[in-house]
Image (tube, grey):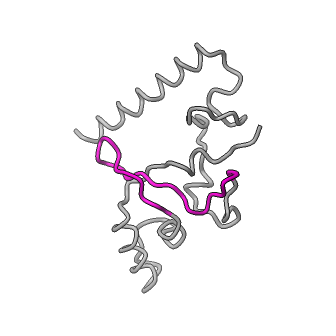
Amino acid sequence: MRCVGHCCRRFAIEHSEKDLHEDLARWRQDPGTSTIRDVEIIAPMVIPIARSRNGLEYVYTCKNLSPGGDCGIYETRPQMCRDFPTEQGCHFRGCKSSQSAYYGMPWWRRAVTRWKWLKSLSDSHMETRK
């Protein structure tokens, strides 16, 4: 089964919409002054949804995602999209893709794996706050 864009429907990055557009303005003046990789692609594609619970990230959806889960800018998508999923696989609940971190696992193994992954995220955010 193929991916249907769970990661594009809801994703978090460390830059606010304001930060993205300010960096995009700098990039338009001189691309060498941009501090956000692929800002010329990312800034116009994001639609803000929320701020993360820990306040360190901003949650977005992508306006280039079709209702069927296809990417409208697949050939020119930013590096953050090309890099997903990581070697850990996709952790979105309900992902039936072979790229799912839970692909082929029994239900109990999926639950343990997801709990460990969520705990690792919590632990890594605690480290950044220290």
In the image, residue 61 sits, relative to residue 104, either above or below, namely: below
Count the numbered circles shown. Answer: 0
In the image, residue 109 sits, relative to residue 86, either above or below, namely: above
Q: Residue 104, position in %: x, y?
A: 71, 22
The residue that appears at 66% across and 65% down in the rendered structure is 73
Specify the quadrant that holds the N terminus. top right
Q: Nearer the viewer, residue 78 or 63?
A: 63
Q: Residue 100, position in %: x, y?
A: 65, 33
Q: Residue furthest bottom?
A: 29
Q: Residue furthest front?
A: 67
46 relative position to 75: left or right: left
Q: Quadrant of residue 93?
A: top right
Q: Nearer the viewer, residue 126 or 91?
A: 91
Q: Residue 54, position in %: x, y?
A: 30, 41
Is residue 63 part of the magenta span, yes or no?
yes
Is residue 57 part of the magenta span, yes or no?
yes
Q: Residue furthest left?
A: 130
77 relative position to 47: left or right: right
Q: Nearer the viewer, residue 111 or 78?
A: 111
The residue that appears at 22% across and 38% down in the rendered structure is 130
Q: Residue 32, position in %: x, y?
A: 45, 78
Report the span colored magenta.
46-69
Q: Residue furthest right?
A: 1
The residue that appears at 72% across and 34% down in the rendered structure is 98
76 relative position to 93: left or right: right
In the image, residue 40 sits, relative to residue 102, either above or below, namely: below
In the image, residue 104 sits, relative to residue 44, either above or below, namely: above
